[in-house]
Image (cartoon, coloured by chain):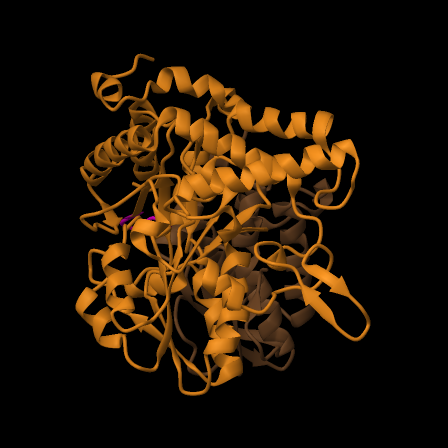
Amino acid sequence: MADLRDLYQEVILEHSKAPRNYRELKTADHKAEGFNPLCGDRFTVFLEMDGDSIRDIGFQGSGCAISKASASMMTQSLKGKTRSEAKELFERFHETVTGRASEKQNDLGKLAVFSGVSEFPTRVKCATLAWHTLTAALDGTQEAISTE
Amino acid sequence: MKASPQEIASGLDVERIRPDFPILRQQAHGHPLVYLDNAATSQKPKAVIDAIVRYYERDNANIHRGVHYLSQQATEEFEAARKAVQLFLHAARPSEIIFLRGATEAINLVAQTYGRVHIGTGDEVLITAMEHHSNIVPWQMLCQEKGAKLQVAPINDYGELILEEFERLLTSRTKIVAVGHVSNALGTINPIAKIIKMAHAKNIPVLVDGAQAVPHVAVNVQELDCDFYVFSSHKLYGPTGVGILYGKQALLEAMPPYQGGGDMISSVTFEKTTYNKVPHKFEAGTPDMSGAVGLRAAIEYLNKLGMENIAAHEHELLAYATEKVSAISGVRIIGTAKEKAGVLSFVIEGVHPHDIGTILDQEGIAIRTGHHCAQPVMERFGIDATARASFALYNTKEEIDALVRGIKKVEEVFA
């Protein structure tokens, strides 16, 4: 049976209560808005690029503990990463939260706390909303992206 | 568990009723299933499930077509279902009952037939701020097409319609009023008799969305004098895929058809088609016959229990749940109207409703979280979403106690 503590790990609860990089980036040259119409979660991700690398990243919005903590920890893990590194990290993160990760792919660092999400299929969208929004920001997609 | 004295006083012996609902006998995540998502859809008594099986095992054929024995059996079953709905709503004639796919389709039908004929540029459609999306969007689409305006009567902080404002918005431009009988997000019971009187005083017809009302309160469309009344079978312990439009005979007769096809015609040539009379004019194609039979079984089941007894039991449950849940610190009830039915929406300080839903689910408790297809209501209360427990005739006080324990668990996890 899935255990709630696997989902709501201390780190996740802590990030959801005190999200990091929770700010609008005045220097942003990329931003995107992500929306989950099922639960009303809504986040904006701001990026300041330095060539191909992410110099600074911030986010704002509202959502559940999982989506907020995921956004917070995502911003921590991405500073200094290139576009392709960021997208590759999302791919591995996505495999982990959907329970498709093989062992060698499990080097997610701190983000591994989200592996419990795979036991709660209805919450995968919460964990990935910020990441989808990031992808949209990197790609310069104009329209608000939606999980539906 | 033993029925409390109150449950016996309300005339509904829940302990004896629960075995009628096979789905309730299971466990969810290792706990007895506590199903409190009845406003989304209700569970079905064995009588409904059996009626559908019986229809397919004994009566199935296409209706209104064949001369053969089975076709007549099926037609009789289908028309008996129409009669049952007529009596349930206290309509004057069975021909005023149209079988559709759901309450949503029924509202769309009225908007696209009555609405397209009677609403033009500069006209107005009046709804309320507590409508479900299904009683907003069809009218919005119509208004966009016709250059008409959607007017919205506001609600107060308790989630009650402000009647003076509503009356002020009834003008010579208003061509139809569409109002929910009971709010799915807040549980508010609207004073629809008063609303209908106010609108009729200005010769404006009224459509009532009764999707959340029919499971909880007895409805008499003639006494109410409403022009249209819609509901869905699946919220009334019947099968999915069936919805009802009640309309006054004269209105239905004057309305153009909605969809073209078989059964809605009297004669067809490539030059001209003569439409069938009501209700068949609005029932193009083969309808959900087994669904209609299932709905009839649901109505008969409810009649046996008595709508008054059901209403009394649910009223008690809601009062008990309101008292217990609002006593938990950090919890705020959204929707505190004087007149309510079936729904307890709430938020917990510092916890998103989606997280509440997941934690309760792990305790075997099913509730709905989100905006409940009523985003404008959420906006009115300055929130993104709520957690919503909604009650049915088979729910017990013990289940509400489980909900209360679950909410306390949520607060522990997020402490």
- Residue A139 appears in which quarter of the rendering? bottom right
- Residue B3 appears in which quarter of the rendering? top left
Residue B119 in percent (x, y) is at 45, 79
Is residue B348 rendered magenta in the image?
yes
Identify the residue at image location x=71%, y=43%: B63
Q: Quadrant of the C terminus of chain A?
A: bottom right
Left or right position of B334 against B84: left
Q: Is residue B17 above or below residue B133?
A: above
Q: Is residue B89 above or below residue A90?
A: above
**Range shown magenta:** B347-352
Tally the marks.
0
User: According to the rendering, which colour does chain B have?
Assistant: orange
Q: Nearer the viewer, residue B247 or A4?
A: B247
Residue B146 in percent (x, y) is at 50, 83
Identify the residue at image location x=66%, y=27%: B53
Residue A61 in percent (x, y) is at 41, 66
User: According to the rendering, which colour does chain A have?
Assistant: brown
Residue B215 in percent (x, y) is at 39, 39
Left or right position of B108 against A93: left
Q: Main secondary structure of the magenta part?
A: loop
Asked whether residue A35 is in view, the answer is: no
